[in-house]
Amino acid sequence: MLLEKESGPGRFNTVTIVRWSSPGDLPAARAAVAEAHRAAGFDPTEFFERVGIVADLANYVEAAARNVMEP
């Protein structure tokens, strides 16, 4: 999912969200993307620096999945 900021003072203008079917899917997805980048000769770090992209990368879980909302 790709989200763009509509209004407000938030720091970031674009947010991407990927929802995995299971936590075990992430390593294979990372490997596949790294291989696609390598095959295309694409260096994401260099690209981000060149065009001024500031990334805030993290993994999240649904709050309910951790019982955060329970009293």
Image: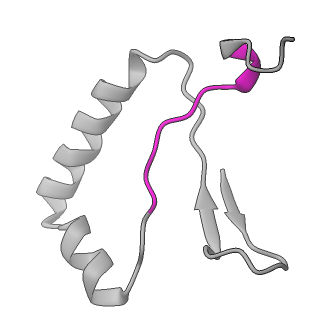
The residue nearer to you, when weighing 7 against 16, is 7
In the rendered view of the protein, which quadrant contains the C terminus?
Answer: top right
When the figure is inspected, residue 11 is found, relative to residue 50, above or below; the finding is above
Is 18 on the left or on the right of 68, as rendered? left
Question: Looking at the image, which residue is at 13% across and 55% down?
Answer: 39
When the figure is inspected, residue 56 is found, relative to residue 20, above or below; the finding is below
When the figure is inspected, residue 23 is found, relative to residue 33, above or below; the finding is above
Question: Looking at the image, which residue is at 37% across and 86% down?
Answer: 52
Is 44 on the left or on the right of 55, as rendered? left
Question: Looking at the image, which residue is at 42% across and 66% down?
Answer: 55
Give coordinates of residue 24: x percent, y percent. 39, 15
Q: Residue furthest front?
A: 71
Kindly indicate the quadrant of the structure image that contains residue 32. top left
Is 55 on the left or on the right of 50, as rendered? right
Q: Main secondary structure of the magenta part?
A: loop
Q: Is residue 15 magenta?
A: no
Give coordinates of residue 6: x percent, y percent. 83, 76
Question: Looking at the image, which residue is at 69% across and 14% down?
Answer: 65
The residue nearer to you, when weighing 24 against 64, is 64
Residue stretch rendered in magenta on the structure: 56-65
Count of picture labels: 0
Is 68 on the left or on the right of 50, as rendered? right
Colouring mode (rainbow / by chain / secondary structure / one colour): one colour
Give coordinates of residue 51: x percent, y percent. 35, 88
Kindly indicate the quadrant of the structure image that contains residue 49. bottom left
